[in-house]
Image (cartoon, rainbow, N blue to C red):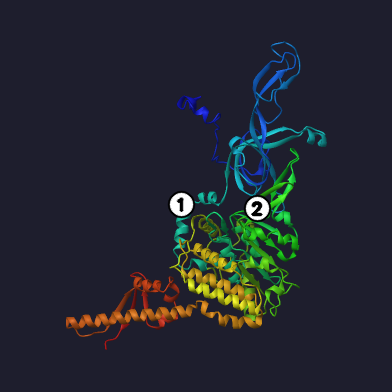
Amino acid sequence: RHTLQMFPSYHTIQSEIHVRIAEVPILDSLRDLRRSHLDCLVKVHGVVTRRSAVNPQLQLAHYTCQSCKRTQGPFRIESAGEAFTPSQCPYCDHATTFRLHPTLSKYRNFQRVNLQETPGSVPPGRVPRTKEVVVTHDLIDIARPGEEVEVTGVYEHKYDSSMTLKSGFPVFSTSITANHICKRNDESSVNNLTSEDVAEILELAKDPQIGKRIVKSIAPSIFGHNMPKMALAMALFGGVPKNVQDKHRIRGDCNVLLLGDPGTAKSQFLKYAEHTAPRAVYSTGKGASAVGLTASVHKDPLTKEWTLEGGALVLADQGVCLIDEFDKMNEQDRTSIHEAMEQQSISISKAGIVTSLQARCAVIAAANPIGGRYDASNTLKDNVELTDPILQRFDVLCVLQDQVDPVADERLARFVTSSHMRAIPAADLARGASQPPQSRKEENEGMIPQELLRKYIQYAKCNCFPVLSGNTFDQEKVSSLYVALRQESAKSGGVPIAVRHIESLMRMAEAHAKMHLRDYVRNDDMNAAISVLLESFFVSQKFSVRKSLRKAFGKFLVDEQDQNALMLHMLSDLFRNEHMYQIIRMRQKGVEEDETVLEIPLEELEGKAQERRMYDLSGFLKSSEFSGAGYVLDGSRRVIVRPTAAR
């Protein structure tokens, strides 16, 4: 009424106005809904697993008397239960039967949606709970299967005759009548970050060594394995998806395959990624089928219509899908995820349903080699029962070998022993047990707390989109690397190199730039991606040719010692020019040359280094080459000092 007073002609635009209630402060879990929540406004969140067709539901009913043929109504139908039917006609005063007038009656759109608990919120050993949600009017088709949503509505109940017959006593079924639906994606989790969290994240990103600190903080309970940790970090951060003129979409997620001997912490890496990623779905090779990973078609028990239900890859949309025991899957089941790993969509053509579902997720898989142990005398292709099409869809291949090394084994044993000593139960700490002292503080130096690391990943995925530009990295280096890899892979075997690997290189460079919260990809990001790609190529070859390959491709790898030597040469030139300037200035003043101290601003050296596409000077300033040449860094004044004697 108030709307029509302000806008008299609004009824020509919309016949009804719906009031939506959003941002309810209390969030309930689906498994916590009880009798006290009946007929109350609740707010729950979950993943849409099934969505029915849109059907008309009676809203305003008109009835026709069978005796006098007069019409009564309208009668407003508020609930989804049975409609009210008049018992006596006021015109003919007869208790007769009435029939619904289908033309005069008004209907509204009606749809049923199945909401399931998110995979990360289900307690261990429990089955995910599912609740039916009734949506009407403008809420129709607002959420698709696989999307995570927040639903605000009224928790209602109605009499269920079928369940009553089975149980022998009155039973009521429950559902949620939706009032407001909001998609709960990664942006909503980022919005939950406080200003203090954002300030701490931005302060953390200023550290030039943040990339190494992130890799060190990945799975801190696992000793060593820097290559798999770097691959895991790139998969968690991900690249930037591209849509070329809305016709060709290029994925931005990095797929990782962990192949190795038993006891090399492959499953522990997957479990860590499950707890760290904002959205993750974990499954095993034997426990997952083709329809369980992609999508299945079910017949709705009420409408008898075929409906879609998303699988693990659909539920992990815009997240991470973790598949353990990848080699134990059937070949037919493994073939079904080819499209999901590259095009990141799942095409369905079953029971008259032809559609496509989104599966924009990174796939991290773990597999065991043939016979249980990795044979280094054979290539990676001969060590695992995976075909070339599936191997090429993985951006990074990590081989974890359990090699006998007395020094490494001793360090590993000390690490595991100290980890168990520090792991004191919370109940013992509450009773007054003392925490043992940290015996090796240098191992924990630079580590990022796990909760802060999780927030850092969420912030980077939603706010950082690095751009590839031609003047920030060496394009000729990428081209020559691809040509050399193609020639070498054709001769030595292993994993065939294809165009996909160039796209993988770009994705990994973007992921490395995301770790630093940069807006563009620099040359050091591309160098890090090249080192990961080459290491992935080396481990796929036979052990007999790995050494020669590392030597042949050494020109593409950036060595820290080479960078230090180049930086030392540039610094020496700067001091030589400064020394000549001081000599000329003293002679012009007629002052005798005396022993003096030369100073160079640090910004001047940084500018020279950036011309050579070198950005991080912290390693050089702490190196033995810097101190051995007699240079001293004054951090408070940001100058480099070197005393010089008069000649």
Residue 286: image location, x then y, percent: 75, 60
Q: Characterize the local packing of mark 2: few (<14), some (14-19) or many (20 or more) Cα atoms within 10 angstroms.
A: many
Residue 383 or residue 245, whichever sits in front: 245
Label disc, if present, on residue 571 of the rendered structure: none
Residue 390: image location, x then y, percent: 67, 65
Residue 102: image location, x then y, percent: 69, 25
In the displayed structure, does residue 214 sit left or right of residue 541? Answer: left
Q: Which residue is mark 2?
A: 314
Q: Amino acid at mark 2?
A: Val
> Which quarter of the picture shows residue 420?
bottom right
Q: Amino acid at mark 1?
A: Ser
Name the quadrant of the C terminus: bottom left
Q: Which residue is mark 1?
A: 195
| Label total for image | 2
Q: Characterize the local packing of mark 1: few (<14), some (14-19) or many (20 or more) Cα atoms within 10 angstroms.
A: few
User: Given this view, does label 2 or label 1 mark the residue nearer the observer?
Assistant: 2
Does residue 417 show up? no
